[in-house]
Image: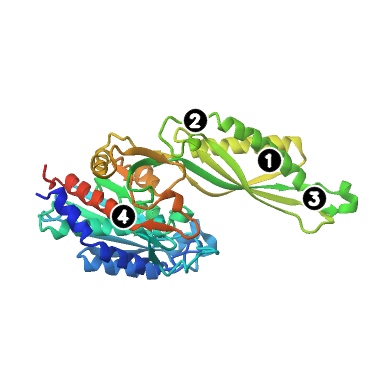
Amino acid sequence: MITKAELYDAVDAREAEIVAFMRDFLALETENPPGRNYREGADFLTAALEQRGYDVEQVTVPPEVVARHYPERTDHERVNVVGRRFGTDTGDGPHVHFTGHFDVVPAGEDWSTDPYEAVVADGRIYGRGASDMKSGIAASLFAVDALVSLDTPLPGTITQSMTVDEETGGFTGLGYLVDEGYVSPDNTDYCVYTECFDSSRVCLGHRGVLKFHVTATGEKAHGCMAHDGRNAITAMNDFLSRVERYRETLHDRTTDLPVTPVESRHADVSATMLDAGYSENVVPDRCRATFYRVLVPEETVEGAREEVRSLMAETEDEFDTTLSYDEIMYAEPTAVSEECTVARTYAEHVRDFHGDPEFVVSPGSDDQRFVVNDAGIEECIVYGPGLLDQAHVVDEYVPVEEILTAAKVMAVSTADLLGVLAE
């Protein structure tokens, strides 16, 4: 049996290794979009897993699958990594699966330092992906290292999967692994998605999202003879007004689940981009708006689609126009019970560092939905060291202490789930 103190010491002993690993990991520019350097990232993680004794497979997504989800990005290959470590009973025991994504959003400009040359200062590691979410992958890797180093026989299987494209929907990342059976009730009893939410909180799920374009059509005309045309902007203006009134009704749809921040405990919709016109003297025949619709867990994506189509029909009836709908991506809401075994186990061990843990639901969406909704695995939580308010920002960082704490909680919780933690 293994004690908490032994595991905590084993993680602390690896602090320098963790920082060095993060430096190398953050140097990989795995930006998405478009999906840059995924093979390089997969090779880096494959080597890290193989050095630790995992059976590793690189799962390359077929071009036709990539084309179905990201037709404009087929020139960038999609490569995921799956590593399995079998226990002393050749897998006869609980199956614990850690998963996280290694794609990052584009770094952008105005950084104080090079976003791909990690800087360690004041107990923080700076770099694109530090919080979202390469530190989550590092924490799970080194948590298992600490567990294995104590030479206690471990029953069951520990799996680590590292996936791509979460930042643009995850369909060719964790979604593909679920579709292909790499994550299923047959090989996964407990799943921990190591997305950023900080080490003090156990995340039970997320709101849903629907991203889409609506295009209004009309007829071009010279601006001096506008009566000869039909202005698509005018039709879109009517639709936008209806969306704004719809937004007010959405704010009345609230959830009792612990979505954080509390201001996000209602449904919402926002117009986020608008594109129309050719010249200042041409009545436009096209106007396209982009929308971001957020769903509370009690809603469904299909219900949201139907409401949008109803608004489109109202504008079409009011104007001599046709509106078309083009979906970008969707994510169904997801939530598991705080009474599930993996949630209770993690909460118990978070208490050693933060007192009573906070159970939360994410305001955005992430890949947890593939495990819960598609694979049908209810024993799945989100837990990781990254800070949510550091996701996607300039000068992104993660505190080193956050990685150490999360790794300790992961190590102790895994030992507990495997039945080898001393009372």
Give the number of the mark in front: 1 or 3: 1
Q: Are marks 4 and 1 in contact (CB under 8 Å)?
A: no
Residue at the spot of label 1? 240
Of residue 416 and residue 81, the one placed in the foreground of this image is 416
Of residue 304 and residue 7, the one placed in the foreground of this image is 7
Question: Is 319 displayed left or right of 9 in the figure?
Answer: right
**Disc 2 or 3, which lies upstream in sequence?**
3
Q: Are marks 2 and 1 in contact (CB under 8 Å)?
A: no
Determine the image quadrant of residue 176: bottom left
**Disc 4 or 1, which lies upstream in sequence?**
1
Residue drawn at the location 41% of the way across and 58% of the way down: 397
Residue drawn at the location 31% of the way across and 68% of the way down: 20
Give the number of the mark in front: 2 or 1: 2
**Disc 2 or 1, which lies upstream in sequence?**
1
In the rendered image, the vertical position of residue 288 relative to residue 309, given as above or below: below
Q: Are marks 2 and 3 in contact (CB under 8 Å)?
A: no
Asked whether residue 365 is in view, the answer is: yes
Q: Position of residue 203 (x, y in %)?
A: 36, 42
Residue at the spot of label 4? 401
In space, the residues marked 1 and 3 are separated at their CA atoms by 20 Å
The secondary structure type at the circle numbered 2 is: loop
The secondary structure type at the circle numbered 3 is: loop
Q: Amino acid at mark 2?
A: Thr
Q: Say few, some or many: other residues with alpha carbon within 10 Å of mark 2 (under 14 / 14 to 19 / 20 or more).
A: some
Determine the image quadrant of residue 127: bottom left
Q: Are marks 3 and 4 in contact (CB under 8 Å)?
A: no
Give the number of the mark in front: 2 or 3: 2
Determine the image quadrant of residue 340: top left
Q: Amino acid at mark 1?
A: Leu
Q: Position of residue 103 (x, y in %)?
A: 42, 60
